[in-house]
Amino acid sequence: MSKFLGLDLGGTNIKVAVIEKVGNTWKVMNEEDVPTEADKGPAHVVSRLAEIAGKKQKEFSDLSGVGVAVPGLFNSDGTIELFPNLPGAWQGFQALEPIKSATKLPTAIINDARAFTLGEAIMGAALGKRTVACLVIGTGVGGGVVIDGKIQLGANGAAGEIAHQIIKFDGPMCGCGARGCAEPLTNSSAIAKLAGTKTAEEAYKNAVAGDEMALAAFKEVAYWISITLTNIMVVLAPDTIIIGGGVAQSGDILLNEIRSAMHERAHLYPASDINIVPATLGFYAGSIGAALYGAITAGAQLSLISTT
Ligand SMILES: [Zn+2]
């Protein structure tokens, strides 16, 4: 049997997962995380990733491919374009080759939200579903689309950026440079600002306690998310939409608001036809998805959709 390694590079932690296909089902064989030490710069961070890959290859002798999830934009040759949340001169830095030469295995790079989507689509919240969209709500709002077990990257890797749909023409400027994207209307700081709290988690606690301002904040954010997702309904007709990120997974308040706002908004077909569900893989979702992408790159794309 072959195993595949996923590395998920975050600002604080590098999350690591090893997966294997057992029968018709993908299983997680190993999970761990180590500090990124991002303040020590790109060369240090990439050498840590390469070191982990080498260590895991020794630990799992049948490792057959590696996937690396990264928090930003990159070129197909593995050079980095932009890591907005990691310090240091990342632009033009070659992040893939050192990891590849540490193991001599097929090694692929993927955006972290796309990796999260792939993990949840194949092994998590949308297990067994064929047409899946995902929104990951945090400081930024990531997204992804998986169709028949295949993560959609489009012509240049930018497919699936659901939160950069322009949904309010006179809305706030977005970090991507456009005006009116969904991201600044739906991210964790939008929730906190509307709720009058420091964090989205605090807003959630207040909403559970019945605080009117916090409840109104979730209603407003759900309104903008419902527009974003109703557009996705038209383009994709997904059977499942996964909502990830801390606030989405802490309870039903946001999801119920999204479901009811979409019910009002969607008329082409009922929004109730779509499962809107929280992500289920937790902390290691991105590294599990990265490992799946490593498996696909290594040629294991057959039967990616589990039937159990
Ligand atoms: Zn944008």
Image (cartoon, rainbow, N blue to C red):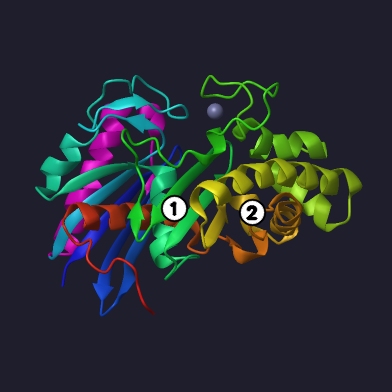
Q: 173 or 285: nearer the eye?
A: 173
Q: Answer left or right for 157 relative to 21.
A: right
Question: Which residue is the site of mark 2?
Answer: 268
Q: 106 or 302: nearer the eye?
A: 302
Residue type (three-letter) at the residue carrying disc 2: Leu
Quadrant assignment, res 198 = top right
Residue 215 seen in the current view: yes
Q: Position of residue 258 (x, y in %)?
A: 70, 53
Quadrant where the C terminus is found in the figure: bottom left
Query: Is 184 contained in the magenta span?
Result: no
Residue 55 seen in the current view: no
Marking on residue 32? none
Q: Position of residue 182 (x, y in %)?
A: 62, 35
Separation of disc 2 and disc 1 at Cα?
Answer: 26 Å
| Quadrant in which ligand 1 is drawn | top right
Magenta residues (range): 34-61
Q: Answer left or right for 280 relative to 206.
A: left
Residue at left offset 70%, top offset 58%: 259
